[in-house]
Image (cartoon, rainbow, N blue to C red):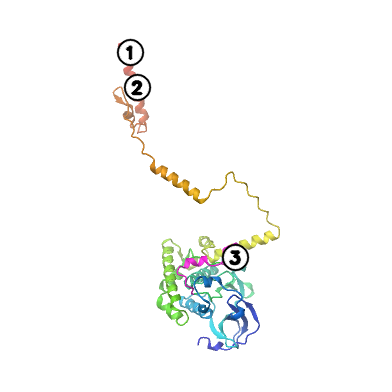
């Protein structure tokens, strides 16, 4: 069984309770770091239910949060990414199974700063985590489940980690559909997932291109059922097609280009980037903080409209009417032949009916001069 060395863990008082788990803070003999033991909630402990899990067709009996977390870590290893902490299965003193992983010392993505989000390492690993979540079908990667591990003494960011991976391998076939699960109003809408990124580097593109069905089966055998494996393969094919489109658009960059300004602009969309989502959350938090301190001017009242707003159906009706009018408009009548003056057409002399030909104005004057000279000659003869 995986995690035999963690067979029995001395658990202390629970430090937090989540929707699907209770987290204990513990330390292992001979290990310098602290670990978190996370077991699924049971019975009355499950005070909340993750609506997204049941919305995609996963029943309570099919949740298997512990197995999903371990499978997510194994797929991360198979891809060569380093964005999920080392995860293993363990049991507590009461024989209840759960997962154990190192305790991350740092801050969540929600509490990150703008300077941290501009670091090349943070950009690169956030895109890696975004690609991994798209492959795994994770519907709960909000900014509270992303940790920025800080170096000792606060000297920069050491790594980016994705925690709480027990909602992976959901039966979602389109990776872009992950952006539709979660809250839809207020600042809580930034806890939703995102679509596929607008830029990747060459290493990430090559790894995703080589990943296939055989490597997936080796990573998740005995942990994930066949239905969820098939959905994962469909998401993988969609991600590979997306990477091919990015390559044609020149958005598969060198791994050393994550600090470029144009790359940062491609990561500002909160609907397609974890970086953009975190930046938007920071902006909204700063705005709310200033508003609470009275540093923001109140918004001006909206001006009354001169005309009531039209409905979408009325606008579409007007557009259709104009299109029919243009389509049914009769063709213009043919132009009348030019009138001859003195046996010669002025338009022909001018090079066209409107006198716009090459040297047209000069030819018109020459024709008029000839006509005047002829009229003078006829007058003298008379």
Q: Which residue is mark 1?
A: 379
Magenta segment boundaries in residue numbering? 169-191
User: Mark on residue 369?
Assistant: 2
Q: Residue at x 68, y 59 (%)?
A: 291
Q: Residue at x 33, y 18 (%)?
A: 373
Residue 175: give x, y in percent of width and height: 47, 68
Residue 191: give x, y in percent of width and height: 57, 67
Q: Is residue 107 left or right of residue 326?
A: right
Question: How many angstroms separate mark 3 from mark 2 (CA)?
Answer: 84 Å
Residue 188: give x, y in percent of width and height: 60, 65
For discs 2 and 1, the disc positioned in front in the rendered view: 1
Q: Quadrant of residue 342?
A: top left
**Helix, strand or loop under label 2:** helix
Task: Pick the residue in front: 133 or 234.
Answer: 234
Q: Is residue 49 left or right of residue 346?
A: right
Residue 298: give x, y in percent of width and height: 68, 54
Q: Which residue is mark 3?
A: 188
Task: Pick the residue in front: 334 or 262.
Answer: 334
**Helix, strand or loop under label 3:** helix
Question: How many angstroms separate mark 2 from mark 1 (CA)?
Answer: 15 Å
Mark earlier in primary sequence (2, 1): 2
The answer to whether residue 65 is magenta is no
Task: Pick the residue in front: 332 or 70.
Answer: 332
Q: Residue furthest left?
A: 343
Mark earlier in primary sequence (3, 2): 3
- Relative to 309, say whether 163 is above or below: below
């Amino acid at each position: 069984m995986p995690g035999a060395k963690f067979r029995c863990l001395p658990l202390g008082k629970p430090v937090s309770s989540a929707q699907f788990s209770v987290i204990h803070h513990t330390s292992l003999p001979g290990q310098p770091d602290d670990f978190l033991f996370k077991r699924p909630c049971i019975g009355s402990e499950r005070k909340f239910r993750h609506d997204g899990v049941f919305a995609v067709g996963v029943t309570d009996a099919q949740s298997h949060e512990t197995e999903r977390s371990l499978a997510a870590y194994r797929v991360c290893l198979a891809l060569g990414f380093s964005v999920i902490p080392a995860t293993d299965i363990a049991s507590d003193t009461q024989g209840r199974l759960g997962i154990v992983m190192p305790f991350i010392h740092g801050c969540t993505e929600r509490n990150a700063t703008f300077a941290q989000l501009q670091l090349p390492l943070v950009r690169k690993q956030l895109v890696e985590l975004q690609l991994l979540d798209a492959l795994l079908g994770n519907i709960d990667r909000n900014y509270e489940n992303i940790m920025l591990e800080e170096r000792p003494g606060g000297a920069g960011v050491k790594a980016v980690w994705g925690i709480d991976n027990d909602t992976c391998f959901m039966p979602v076939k389109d990776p872009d559909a992950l952006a539709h699960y979660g809250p839809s109003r207020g600042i809580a809408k930034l806890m939703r997932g995102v679509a596929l990124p607008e830029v990747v580097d060459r290493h990430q593109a090559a790894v995703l291109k080589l990943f296939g069905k055989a490597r997936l089966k080796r990573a998740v055998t005995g942990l994930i059922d066949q239905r969820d494996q098939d959905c994962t393969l469909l998401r993988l094919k969609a991600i590979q097609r997306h990477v091919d489109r990015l390559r044609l658009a020149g958005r598969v960059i060198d791994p050393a280009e994550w600090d470029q300004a144009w790359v940062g602009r491609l990561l500002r969309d909160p609907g397609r980037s974890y970086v953009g989502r975190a930046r938007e959350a920071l902006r909204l938090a700063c705005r709310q903080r200033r508003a609470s301190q009275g540093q923001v001017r109140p918004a001006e009242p909206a001006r009354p409209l001169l005309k009531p707003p039209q409905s979408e159906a009325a606008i579409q009706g007007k557009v259709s009417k104009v299109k029919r009018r243009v389509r049914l408009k009769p063709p213009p009548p043919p132009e009348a032949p030019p009138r001859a003056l003195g046996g010669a057409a002025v338009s022909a002399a001018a090079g066209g009916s409107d006198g716009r030909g090459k040297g047209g104005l000069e030819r018109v004057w020459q024709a008029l001069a000839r006509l005047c000279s002829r009229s003078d000659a006829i007058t003298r003869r008379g």
